Image (cartoon, rainbow, N blue to C red):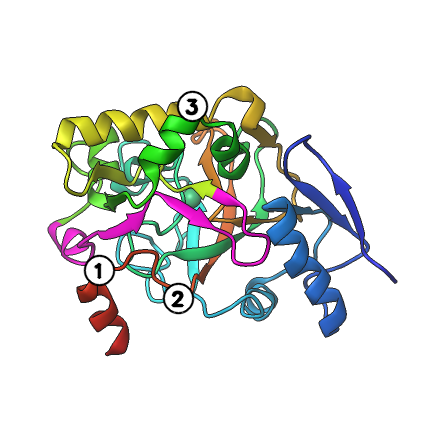
């Protein structure tokens, strides 16, 4: 049966129908989904039968998966767990617990793993337990935002590189307590070009978000002002889509082309469990010689 593609926003986001990503899929169908990701940046699938095993199998078709670091309870697995439930007991985690403070950073507009030397191609988020209200995930198209930029800003961004750091973004929402010294040691940050071009359709996108700390070679405050301006420009309402989750939803987004953020829900009154797999981008975005040396190891 052919898949169906229904656009959900004037600028991006498509709902893909007629397919269960938890079941075996032929290469032609997968190729349509992969092409749709380049075209629409965010793909929504309802009523999927995914479990952990089939989510990993389907995610790997996009590329190699990231292993989750020490800051997430699912460390050492390909899952970044987004939940208010203890991974071992299933009990609701108290608000003041480090694991909940850490998740506050998800309320900032960001691109997953932009703080890693090899950033992410796309993330796949599967809704396993969903609260009755709240907890939407919002997306903003960095491609349409780039195209709407004034020409002088586009010229200014050409060749600019920003440093991205998870320590920077987490400490901006929780100055103490979000990350331990051991977690910080694992997170040296990375340099990324501020404009990324899709290699298939050659559309350019702003690459900034909350992990972007400053512009390399610029006075720190001036770089921060530019990044803040870009983040605010690019997340204006006309560039944004809000996804209200249903259990069984899978959403895939292109981290090269959108920013996203979590929104609040009653973390003491309702349960929420989302499983994210993160696909590696497979290329460095900057021309730093030291980064390429790392790649050769
Ligand atoms: Fe995220």
Q: Quadrant of the N terminus?
A: bottom right
Q: Quadrant of ligand 1?
A: top left
x and y percent of residue 110 in the render? Answer: 39, 39
Q: Quadrant of the C terminus?
A: bottom left
- Which residue appears farthest toward the bottom when viewing the image? 297
Q: Which residue is mark 2?
A: 77
> Residue beneath label 1, please?
288
Along the line of sight, which residue is nearer the eye, 60 or 294?
Answer: 294
Q: On screen, 9 above or below 205?
A: above
Residue located 42% across and 56% down the image = 120
Question: Residue 185, image x and y in percent?
Answer: 14, 56
Q: Residues within 10 Å of mark 1 (few under 14, many from 20)?
A: few
Residue span colored magenta = 181-204
Q: Is residue 173 magenta?
A: no
| Residue under the point 75% across and 70% down | 28
Instruction: Pinpoint residue 131: horizontal percent, then vertical percent.
Output: 57, 34
Q: Label 1 to label 2, Cα distance in Å?
A: 29 Å
Q: Quickly name the residue at label 3.
A: 233
Where residue 200 appears, as percent x and y from the top left, is 58, 58
Label 1's element?
A: loop
State yes or no: discs 1 and 3 in contact (Cβ < 8 Å): no
On whether residue 184 falls in the magenta region, the answer is yes
- Left/right of residue 169 with respect to residue 125 in the rendered view: left
Reply above or below: 200 against 85: below
Looking at the image, can residue 37 be seen? yes
Q: Residues within 10 Å of mark 3 (few under 14, many from 20)?
A: some
Question: What is the spatial separation of the Cα atoms under label 3 and label 2, in whole angstroms?
Answer: 36 Å
Q: Is 6 left, or right, of 203 in this rendering?
A: right
């Amino acid at each position: 049966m052919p898949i169906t593609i229904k656009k959900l926003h004037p600028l991006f986001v498509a709902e893909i129908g007629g397919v269960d990503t938890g079941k075996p899929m032929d290469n032609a169908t997968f190729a349509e989904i992969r092409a749709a990701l380049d075209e629409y940046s965010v793909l929504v699938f309802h009523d999927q039968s995914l479990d952990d095993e089939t989510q990993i199998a389907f995610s790997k078709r996009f590329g190699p998966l990231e292993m989750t670091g020490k800051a997430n309870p699912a460390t050492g697995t390909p899952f970044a767990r987004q939940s208010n439930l203890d991974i071992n007991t299933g009990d609701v985690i108290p608000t003041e617990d480090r694991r909940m403070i850490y998740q506050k950073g998800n309320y900032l507009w960001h691109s997953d793993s932009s703080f890693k030397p090899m950033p992410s191609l796309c993330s796949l988020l599967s809704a396993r337990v969903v609260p009755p209200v709240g907890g939407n995930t919002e997306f903003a198209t960095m491609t349409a935002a780039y195209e709407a930029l004034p020409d002088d800003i586009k010229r200014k961004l050409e060749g600019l590189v920003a440093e991205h750091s998870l320590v920077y973004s987490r400490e901006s929402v929780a100055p103490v307590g979000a990350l331990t010294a051991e977690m910080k040691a694992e997170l040296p940050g990375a340099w990324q070009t501020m404009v990324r071009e899709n290699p298939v359709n050659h559309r350019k996108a702003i690459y900034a978000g909350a992990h972007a700390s400053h512009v390399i070679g610029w006075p720190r405050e001036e770089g921060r002002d530019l990044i803040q301006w870009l983040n605010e420009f690019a997340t204006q309402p006309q560039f944004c889509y809000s996804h209200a989750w249903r259990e069984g939803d899978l959403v895939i987004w292109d981290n090269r082309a959108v920013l996203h953020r979590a929104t609040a829900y009653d973390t003491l009154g309702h349960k929420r469990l989302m499983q994210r797999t993160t696909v590696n981008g497979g290329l460095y975005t900057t021309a730093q010689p030291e980064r390429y040396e790392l790649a050769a190891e």
